[in-house]
């Protein structure tokens, strides 16, 4: 077996909470997360990133300035991680950096993730691999989700059909068929819809908090069935995979349009948004992953017990656990995935899954910025 190498994965997702950094030990079929670091975004950085999701004045210059700021924050978190683990930059093969998504419009053949990888390589003296999505979109794919390729390599089983459900700002599902049971290597991956994004925004508006811890506030409300049905009538939910989405569709304006009783108690809307996430995941699994034996959760939504318990009620016959049981903690799966994607890029190995993104075929994704 080839000798394992050290890679760092950096992920900052649609939830805009901050930067996840994972130090990983990788070989071809295993991933061990050795250490982690989280750097929260300041309110100012979060506000600027959120504003750049939509057209605004002087956005090109503002994008370039915040991209440099992100590179410095990524570098800061990386240096802290290295210092804590008494490692030098030359001991790290590469950094895989997802960058911060500010636009995702695959229907218009573009996606934008920012983070100035050239500056990150300069500041860390470590090679950086980034811009993973563009090559897949060039091959007529969605450019997302990309983590199913990692899920397949690390979480696949010969004994059971598994679904990995990542609940970040957006929720996405990876279906991993057991090759022994299905006599195939079937993998399916797609975004099911909003994860924490709408609930976080609603919580910020009404409580001034970044998120509803454990779903405690939403648990005090009652879901508004009419609004939930109206939300679930969104055409995106009925689209077959492959598909991906983001804040370009599911945003505050979308929520306002789908509230049939906008003046009811705020906690009722919060509860309705928890139900929206759970029901859209349930519907997607029922429609496209009917043979699932086990479900493993990851992402920030795995900490929301109200959401997790709602999912368990909707899927009572399928065991639901966290990816911790598969060896990667729920908060670090995506960061670890981009470390793995970087390794694939450096080895000129395909790191997309056409079944998940809709690309015309396997492609080597990512741009390399040598140290």
Image (tube, grey):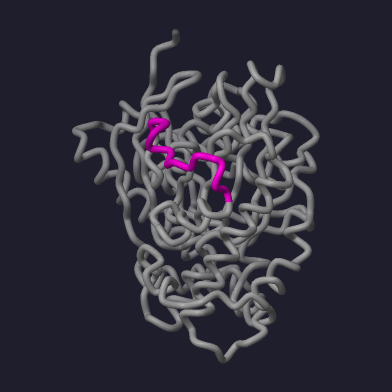
Direction from residue 101 to residue 234 in the image, left or right? right
Tell me: 99 left or right of 32: right
Question: Which quadrant does the N terminus fall into?
Answer: top left
Look at 42% across and 46% down and name the residue there: 120
Total labels drawn: 0
Looking at the rendering, in which quadrant would you find the C terminus?
Answer: top left
Taking the view exactly as shown, the residue that stands out farthest to the front is 317
Residue 119, image x, y percentages:
43, 49
Residue 346 image offset from top left, x and y in percent: 53, 26
Depth check: give the residue in front, 160 or 141. Answer: 160
Foreground pick, 226 / 26: 226
> Which span of residues is magenta-colored?
315-327
* Residue at screen point 67% across, 57% down: 245
The relative height of residue 304 versus residue 340 in the rendered view (above or below) is below
Q: Write the residue at 42% across / 42% down.
A: 322
Q: Quadrant of residue 217?
A: bottom left
Q: Check residue 251 for magenta coloring.
A: no
**In the image shown, does 253 or 266 lie closer to the viewer?**
266
Task: Judge whether 188 appears above or below 362 on screen.
Answer: below
Horizontally, residue 217 falls left or right of residue 53, namely: left
Q: From this view, report whether residue 22 is shown above or below residue 277.
A: above
Q: Position of residue 11 (x, y in %)?
A: 45, 48
**Was residue 324 drawn as part of the magenta stretch in this picture?**
yes
């Amino acid at each position: 077996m080839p000798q394992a190498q050290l890679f760092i994965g950096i992920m900052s997702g649609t939830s805009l909470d901050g930067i996840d950094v994972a130090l990983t030990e990788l070989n071809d079929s295993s991933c061990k997360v050795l250490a982690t670091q989280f750097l929260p975004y300041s309110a100012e950085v979060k506000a600027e990133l959120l504003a750049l999701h939509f057209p605004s004045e002087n956005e090109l210059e503002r994008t370039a300035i915040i991209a440099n700021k992100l590179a410095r924050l990524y570098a800061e978190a990386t240096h802290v991680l290295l210092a804590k683990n008494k490692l030098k930059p030359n001991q790290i093969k590469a950094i895989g950096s997802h960058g911060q998504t500010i636009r995702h419009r695959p229907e218009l053949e573009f996606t934008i993730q920012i983070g100035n990888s050239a500056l990150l390589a300069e500041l860390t003296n470590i090679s950086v691999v980034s811009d993973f999505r563009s090559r897949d979109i060039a091959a007529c794919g969605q450019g997302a989700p990309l983590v199913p390729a990692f899920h397949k390599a690390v979480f696949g089983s010969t004994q059971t059909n598994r679904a990995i459900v990542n609940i970040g700002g957006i929720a996405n599902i990876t279906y991993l068929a057991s090759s022994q049971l299905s006599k195939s290597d079937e993998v399916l991956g797609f975004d099911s819809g909003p994860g924490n994004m709408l609930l976080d925004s609603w919580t910020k508006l009404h409580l001034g908090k970044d998120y509803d811890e454990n779903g405690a506030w939403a648990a005090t409300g009652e879901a508004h069935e009419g609004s939930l049905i109206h939300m679930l009538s969104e055409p995106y939910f009925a689209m077959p995979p492959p598909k991906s989405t983001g804040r370009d569709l599911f945003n505050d304006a979308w929520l306002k349009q789908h509230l049939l009783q906008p003046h009811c108690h705020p906690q009722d809307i919060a509860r309705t948004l928890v139900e929206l996430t759970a029901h859209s995941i349930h519907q997607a699994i029922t429609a496209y992953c009917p043979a699932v034996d086990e479900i493993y959760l990851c992402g920030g939504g795995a900490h929301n017990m109200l959401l997790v318990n709602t999912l368990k009620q909707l899927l009572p016959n399928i065991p639901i656990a966290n990816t911790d049981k598969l060896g990667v903690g729920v908060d670090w799966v995506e960061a670890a995935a981009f470390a793995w994607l970087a390794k694939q890029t450096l080895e000129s190995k395909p790191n997309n899954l056409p079944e998940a993104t809709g690309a015309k075929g396997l492609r080597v994704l990512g741009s390399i910025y040598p140290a």
